[in-house]
Amino acid sequence: MLSYAYIGGFVLLAALLHASWNALLHGNGDRLLSMAWMSVAIAAVSTIVIPFLPLPARAAWPYIITSGLIHIVYNVSLVRSYRRSDLAQAYPIARGSSPLFVTLGAALFADEAIGPLQALGVLLISGGIIAIALQGRHVSRMGVMAALATGVTIAFYTVIDGIGVRLSGGQALAYTAWMFLFYWMMPVLFVARRGLAALLMPLRTAPMTTGISLIGGLVSLAAYGIVIWALQSGAIGAVSALRETSVVFAVLIGRLFLQETVSAKRWLACMTVVGGAVCLGL
């Protein structure tokens, strides 16, 4: 089995990629349209590579289908959530709470346990991310509950993918491609809601924005593909926790490239997350 440090290095790369595509899409007002074009890029790449890959083992297919459908539900819910500023503020709580839910789900359904040091790492990362989310923000009880529900959804598909990829016969890439094939449903849903003309119009009126969405989709595909690969060998809860360090990368990107102010408390919360990542790597 690969070491936590080796797997962790790749998952941290996935976290950086995750933060990067979020930064690329920062400020895009029509998130449903952006998600549709991101999904086109993800699904198109999956469609192209599938003929060249062996099929995952039969035991993995229920997980591939379930995960693909849950991802679509999650994407639609996420787009809808941004219509409520309160939930948009609370969303980082979902990213922080999900590793805890993942660790619990992995223990219940994958018969997986992690050592005390790794458990401490998960707690530090989750606590640090939630501290980053709450600084300077007032989030209502309903917002917190909605965010925690989102965290459960993230945990649900992460645990499913963690179990499913281990049943795929070592075909992590094929598992990822077939799961992401379901992303064709996003542009279909967009067309059903707004029409084909609304989907295609940005190609003429806002090609740069559409291009950014396509690039964001490719980066997102790479980011979660790395996570699925890591789930083959790494503890599901630990991999999930490292993935959510993307919040720290987002803070750094905002400071370095968007000239955003970062308070001393936020830096301390970031260092807490980093300390958790170190624990997972030991």
Image: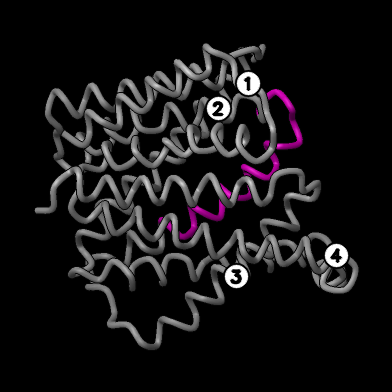
Q: Is residue 24 above or below residue 41?
A: above
- The reply to whether callout 3 and callout 4 are in contact (CB within 8 Å) is no
The residue under label 4 is 206
In the foreground, 70 or 38: 38
Q: Position of residue 115 (x, y in %)?
A: 12, 29
The residue under label 2 is 147
The residue under label 1 is 143
Q: Main secondary structure of the magenta part?
A: helix
Q: Quadrant of the C terminus?
A: top left
- The reply to whether callout 1 and callout 2 are in contact (CB within 8 Å) is yes
Residue at point 77%, 48% (across, down): 28
Who comes first in sequence, dot 3 or dot 2?
A: 3
* In the displayed structure image, the side of residue 1 where residue 183 appears, left or right: right
Who comes first in sequence, dot 3 or dot 4?
A: 3
Report crowding for label 2: few under 14, some 14 to 19, many 20 or more residues within 10 A (C-alpha): many
> Mark on residue 167?
none
- The reply to whether callout 3 and callout 1 are in contact (CB within 8 Å) is no
Who comes first in sequence, dot 1 or dot 4?
A: 1
Q: Position of residue 254 (x, y in %)?
A: 62, 35
Cα distance, mark 3 to mark 1? 31 Å
Which three-letter amino acid code belongs to the residue tagged 1? Gly
Q: Is residue 175 above or below residue 220?
A: below
Query: Is residue 247 inside the magenta stretch?
Result: no
Which three-letter amino acid code belongs to the residue tagged 3? Ala
Report crowding for label 3: few under 14, some 14 to 19, many 20 or more residues within 10 A (C-alpha): many
* In the displayed structure image, the side of residue 122 where residue 194 appears, left or right: right
In the foreground, 19 or 80: 19
